[in-house]
Image (cartoon, rainbow, N blue to C red):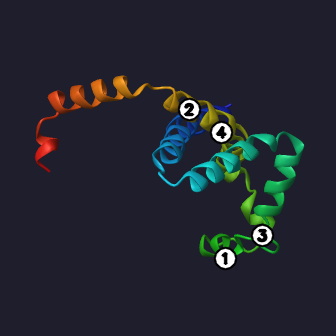
Amino acid sequence: MAHVGLYLLIWLASLVVLATFLALVVHTLRVRWSSQTLWLVFYLLRALAGASSVLLWLFVLDPTVSPVSSLLHVFGFSSFVQVIVSAHLPAIFTIIAFWTGSGGWIVIMYGALNNISPAHRRRLHSADRVAHPASDAA
C-alpha cells in the first residue's frame, strides 16, 4: 500500500507541475513551426496508451538495447533486472503514467492558454506590476 501512495503522490505532483510547465513552454514559443511540432509530440504521447506504452518503456529501461543506455549506465544500471527492482517500481510507474497521460493534459492547458484574450492578458500584466513593483526595476 505504501508503494501505491508513493506512486500517486509522485505522479500527481509531476503531472500538475510538468504538464503546466510544458504547456507554458509551447505557448511562449514564437516560432510557429517549433510550437506546432512540440504540440504534435505531446499529443502523440497521449496516443501511446496501455500495453503499447508499457512495451515501449520496457525497451527504453533495458540498458542493453535502450536509446538512453548511457544515461542508465551513469546511474549504475547494467541490466534490466537492476532497473526494475521493487524499490524502483513507484518511480518507473510514475514515468510511464506521466508520459502516457500528460500529452492530453498538455494539449488542454495549451488550448486554455491560447483562449486568454489579449485584453485579459494586459490586465494580468498590470495586476502583476502592481503586486510586484520591484520586478519592473530588474
The residue at 53%/46% (across/down) is: 26
Report the residue marked by disc 4. Answer: 102
The residue at 61%/30% (across/down) is: 108
Specify the quadrant of the image occupied by residue 106: top right
Near-viewer residue (117 or 69): 117
Q: Determine whether label 4 and label 1 are within 8 Å by CB.
A: no
Tag in front: 2 or 3: 2
The residue at 45%/26% (across/down) is: 116
Among numbered discs 2 and 1, the one appearing first in the sequence: 1
Please state the horizontal and vertical placement of residue 30, each as a whole percent of the image. 47, 51
Q: Is residue 62 left or right of residue 33?
A: right
Q: CA distance from mark 4 to mark 1?
A: 25 Å
Among numbered discs 2 and 4, the one appearing first in the sequence: 4
Q: Is residue 99 left or right of residue 14?
A: right
Name which residue type carries label 4: Ser
Report the residue marked by disc 3. Answer: 66
Name which residue type carries label 1: Ser
Q: Determine whether label 4 and label 3 are within 8 Å by CB.
A: no
Tag in front: 2 or 4: 2
How many residues crowd mark 2 within 10 Å: few (<14), some (14–19), many (20+)? some
Q: Secondary structure at mark 4?
A: helix
Please state the horizontal and vertical placement of residue 33, each as a whole percent of the image. 60, 55
Report the residue marked by disc 1. Answer: 70
Report the residue marked by disc 2. Answer: 109
Name which residue type carries label 2: Met
Q: Is residue 23 above or below residue 126?
A: below
Q: CA distance from mark 2 to mark 1?
A: 33 Å
Q: CA distance from mark 2 to mark 4?
A: 10 Å
Near-viewer residue (101 or 114): 114
